Image (cartoon, rainbow, N blue to C red):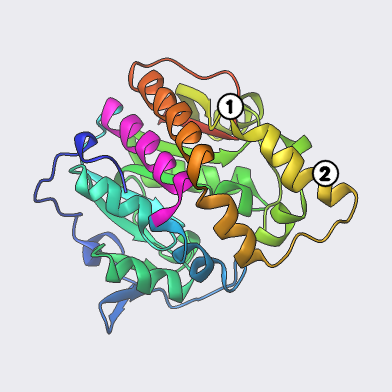
Amino acid sequence: MSNPADLQTEDVAFPDLATLAPGLVQRDPGLWFARNQAAVSYPPDGNAACLTVEDQSFWFRHRNRCIVSMVRRFSPGGGFLDIGGGNGYVAKGLAEAGVACALIEPGLDGALAAHARGIDPVICARLEDTDLAPASIAAAGMFDVLEHIEDEASALRQVNALLLPGGWLFLTVPAYQFLFSIDDSSAGHFRRYTISSLTRVLLAAGFRIEFASYMFAPLPPLIFLLRTLPTWFRLHRGTSHERDAAEHIPSGAAARLMNCLLTAEVKRLRAGRSIPFGGSCLCAAAKA
């Protein structure tokens, strides 16, 4: 989870969901459901696999620190909607930072995990099935979600319509199409991004870019060696569970070096300075 120094715990609440989306139905153990439940481009066991590594993963921990830093820097205020929020790891970090956060997750196992982490409300549905009122949300996040959506332009226009005038959208996406591998395909990714390609699709959907940067600067060479090259040469790399544990939870000198490098990244981002290279893109955009 995010460094306690990043956080300021407050009593926060998301706006009344029954008013924002009267078509949703609340069921035990407290989740909200849409009338229509449809599939998404994500592995059926994807949330369960993430849940086994999230709390110990340097990757999830660093991404949370970067996201919290960016959201606090732009201080959107009001309700924050974590779209495709999975097991609630990011939403919990944002809530601990004083952000009134709700979560949308179409996978039931992820929605249940988020609810168990204390996120409230949790909507188990796709965004397009929720019937949330237009111009009703102050800020939204799509953290490693956009790459799972084939029609990215339509999805971003829908989020734009959902936001209040001047509302905010915060995103993270995987970087560089040349790094695309079988791991991306297995995860349900349609593409990877550069800052330029992400900027183009956001501008076309009616956003203006306030801040954009890469993050995870140490990772592209590792991704290329451990994922892209084996994909090119069709090399077997063991089970996904074994890979997740090895890649997300390094030990010894590797862990210490990674922590040192990523701590420097967080300091740079907090100072408002972008990073020119990395395994992921980070972006804050405002509704134009």
Q: Amino acid at mark 2?
A: Leu
* Residue drawn at (23%, 35%) of the image: 6
**For mark 2, what is the residue?**
229
Question: For residue 64: magenta?
Answer: yes
The quadrant of the image that shows the C terminus is top left
**For mark 1, what is the residue?**
199
Region in magenta: 56-73
Q: Is residue 257 left or right of residue 117?
A: right
Point out which mark residue 99 bears: none
* Residue drawn at (20%, 54%) of the image: 14
Question: For residue 8: magenta?
Answer: no
* Residue, far bottom: 28
Compared with residue 131, is residue 25 higher up or lower down, i.e. above or below?
below
Q: Amino acid at mark 1?
A: Thr
Q: Secondary structure at mark 2?
A: helix
Mark 1–mark 2 CB contact (< 8 Å): no
Mark toward the start of the polypeptide (1 vs 2) = 1
Residue 83 figure quarter: bottom left
**Residue 206 on image: x %, y %:** 51, 31
